[in-house]
Amino acid sequence: MERIVPARTPTAPASARRWPLHGSAATRVIEQWAAGSLAPHTLMQRAGQAVARLARAWRPHARHILVVAGGGNNGGDGWLAAALLQQHVAGLPGARVQVWALGDTSRQPPDARWARAQALAAGVEVIGAPPAEAAQPDVVIDAVFGLGLSRRVQGSAVDAVHWLHTCAAPTLCVDLPSGLDADSGHWWVEAPASPPAPRLTLTLLTLKPGLFTGLGRACAGDAIWFDDLGVSPALAPDAWLTLPGGWPDVPALQRAHASHKGRRGDVLVLGGQLPGATGVGMTGAAILAGRAALRAGAGRVYVGLLDGGAPMPALDTGQPALMLRTAEAALASSLPEHAVVVAGCGGGPAMAALLPALLARAPRLVLDADALNALGPLSSGTALPEAWVQRRKAGWHTVLTPHPLEAARLLGCDSARVQADRLAAARTLAERLGATVALKGSGTVIAAPGTPPLVNLSGDGLLASAGTGDVLAGLIGARLAAADEATLASAAARADAVAQAVAAHGALTASWRGHWPPTATDLLL
Ligand SMILES: NC(=O)C1=CN([C@@H]2O[C@H](COP(=O)(O)OP(=O)(O)OC[C@H]3O[C@@H](n4cnc5c(N)ncnc54)[C@H](O)[C@@H]3O)[C@@H](O)[C@H]2O)[C@@H](O)CC1
């Protein structure tokens, strides 16, 4: 059994910086294969033991234990854990192990039926409703749904899931928090509030993508543990979970005594509309992206501001090393051909006019915010604009960094649809455009054509503030600028590079100890 969240970083070795993720279909295949080679009930026995062991380690003094068990094998894991915990606490003062049994027990699958028989033989108490408020358990085990949930919750389980999500007792979720979709991180009941009590999730056999993207992290609790039940999955993963680490490599930069700024790569940020007649300016967005690129080690960072009519600032007083100029001046130079271009951080509608030139000239291009809006819907079935076709032919690199609403605009759907299956949305965009896509949000998904997507593990709710997306775009720009062409040769390598920048971005809040939540500028101090 190992702890996945909170992640043990940044000291984790490179080999430990990714885990395979298997969705429900792949997990079923692995389960069937393993069950076929083991004695009957072995997997469930191991699952129940793992649950009971973690419950005891987490709440060693718990005497009143409540298992909420559904009618399938997830419930079976719960029944078996109840049996083992009953044996453990039997005879202790105040000991009480209860199972709130849901579903039709006459229709239980064989493993679950066997597990229930073990629990009844051990003397657990079966109840048909949650305990009264005055008799709150010391720990609750949520074993209502695991892999078997793939549609909206119905029947008596709705109330049980709601009770579990609002109960004040520490809760251990078996395999998945009940209500969560294993594949997508979609939540199949009323939108959840943050659970009021500590909770953790022990996922079994495989790590599921839904735990790490969408609502997965918000619902799984403070920690996510993993037990492979002694089975090594001989099946290619659906996605990879990636950890921070490895970039920027400050010690390597220190050791490069004979280096110079020209070797660190150049970044050109284009955007940051100056205020004009409308009085609306977005200069800060481009400055933040530029500062982030500089902070992450780019050799030279240029910021080309879009002319809104207001006078150009002479410099960024917070980071005078940034080289400010007008977007026009930047485009009149050879920077688009030589630097990594990060476009769209605060560009406003003017970005649309620049986009064709950037698509045609910039071999390494990061498209963010207003540059994505300028692309417009890329609905399936319609031919791609010629500029995209040419970029793909030339093997040029394009990275898109949409948040869910921007991704929805590009895909011609709404953001709820994107959020309902973030991995699919990112993959679709990447395949359509031949680009690397970082779909932002909890569990940012990085997808590139023909390779399994990556799900980023770092980051937390402190990143949900203005300007953090600009910082990410700048970091991705710096990461690409640091790479030579050979190391970006494959789609998987490009996805890895982008994932490193995403991971470094997520890690920015991990060490935040301030009384106030950080602003995007604070993250770069
Ligand atoms: N078979 C085994 O030995 C093992 C099973 N395991 C456990 O088994 C779980 C998968 O078990 P199952 O495939 O039985 O699935 P679940 O137990 O997750 O769910 C099936 C149950 O949910 C009910 N259900 C499904 N959708 C519903 C909805 N929308 N509204 C209301 N009720 C609904 C079904 O009627 C059934 O009672 C895993 O998540 C894991 O916890 C693992 O521990 C590995 C070993």
Image (cartoon, rainbow, N blue to C red):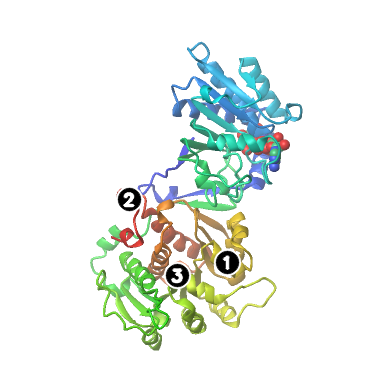
Label 3 and label 1: CA atoms lie apart by: 21 Å
Of the numbered discs 3 and 1, the one sitting upstream in the chain is 1
Q: Of all residues shown, which one is farthest toward the top? A: 91
Along the line of sight, which residue is nearer the eye, 298 or 350?
A: 350
- Find residue 430 and name its label: 1
Q: What amino acid does circle 2 point to? A: Trp
Q: Position of residue 279 (x, y in %)?
A: 39, 78
Q: What amino acid does circle 1 point to? A: Ala
Label 2 and label 1: CA atoms lie apart by: 33 Å
Instruction: Decide if residue 425 is on the left or right side of residue 297.
Output: right
Along the line of sight, which residue is nearer the eye, 165 or 418?
A: 165
* Residue in the image at 61% along x and 49% along y: 183
Quadrant for ligand 1 reads top right
Along the line of sight, which residue is nearer the eye, 118 or 461?
A: 461
Q: Of all residues shown, which one is farthest toward the bottom? A: 332
Give above or below for 224 relative to 93.
below
Give above or below for 295 relative to 32.
below
* Disc number lying in front (3 or 1): 1
